[in-house]
Amino acid sequence: MMLRSKKKTACIIGLGKIGIAYDFYSKSKTKSHFKALEKSKYFKLIAGVEKKKIKLLNEINLQIFSNIEDLSKNYNPYLIVISVPTKKHMGIFSDIMQYLSPKIILFEKPMGKNITEAKKIVKICKKNKTYLFVNYVRNYLPNLEKLKKLIYKKKLLVHLRYSGNIHNDFCHYFYLFDYLFGLKLHPKKRNIENMFKNCTLKIIKKKNNQKDNLKILGKNLSIEWKNDNFIKIKTNFYQKILNMDLENYQSHVINSIAQNIFNNKKRCLISGQDALRFHKIFND
């Protein structure tokens, strides 16, 4: 399918932090679905669904509906972004499939609160021929392939300092490390420290107000990812910096999905089927 000149319609369900608020007053960042779709050359944001009365929504020119049934009386969006709390994923998804027929659905991670919900979502989307993706933003970043080539098949020690919890925060790093190092699972023993190939993982839980930090150490190699945007790389022979542009991650997600579907360009996308792996390993 080739992209036509006309943009495809899009809708955001859940206009909270990731939906709109993260970057609303920022001129340089694109961390919300709202801003990413407003900037997109592939999609046109036509509506939102939000039950709560949020003052911020008075500052935008977008039609807001209180439920999906009312939305369906006016629109049938091509792309739907689901950015409600995880516990509400299944209910919202059921309403979408009852009243609408989207071609693409983008879920906030981890897509359903357990393996049962996640499998059901994947099965229904497959039956309806709906493209299904999950918003593991780090896997959509530019220059990620360059980082992978740099560490390919090297024996590494990885220090991860992150805030949050396994289900809602470590899941990001699970898919990032799966791409960078490759997943290695043992049938009986699933030790996080030894879960990835060529990599020993050391995890330290940080306080919620501290930024995540990733350090990769190998023979004559040091890679440090402290800043949201830049990775510092040092070897015995050179030093360089990779720009990951994490401050605009949501644009990279939307663009990667569109390029994959419309222009057949391969990207490191996390499909609904891929997202089942985390649920299988860390189920409940």
Image (cartoon, grey):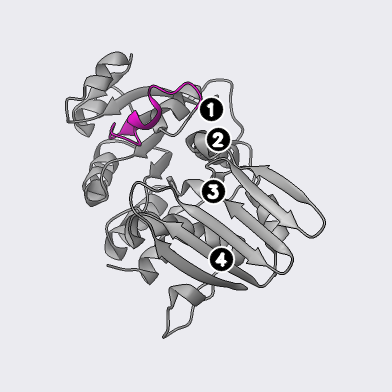
Query: Horizontally, is 227 left or right of 89 in the view?
Result: right
Judge the density around disc 1: few (<14), some (14-19), many (≥20) Cα neighbours within 10 Å. Answer: many
Q: Earlier in the sequence, mark 3 or mark 1?
A: 1
Using the image, determine if residue 106 lies above or below residue 238.
above
* 231 in the magenta segment: no
Q: Which residue shows up at 39% across the image and 27% down it?
A: 34
Of the residues shown, which amino acid type is indicated by label 4? Val
Q: Which residues are magenta?
A: 12-28
The residue positioned 67% from the left and 68% from the top of the image is 218
On whether residue 15 falls in the magenta region, the answer is yes
Q: Amino acid at mark 2?
A: Asn
| In the rendered image, the vertical position of residue 258 relative to residue 42, given as above or below | below
Going from N to C along the chain, the mark reached first, 4 or 2, is 4
Residue 70 pos. (x, y %): 20, 27
Element marked by disc 2: helix
Using the image as rendered, state which of residue 230 and residue 245 is in the foreground.
Answer: 230
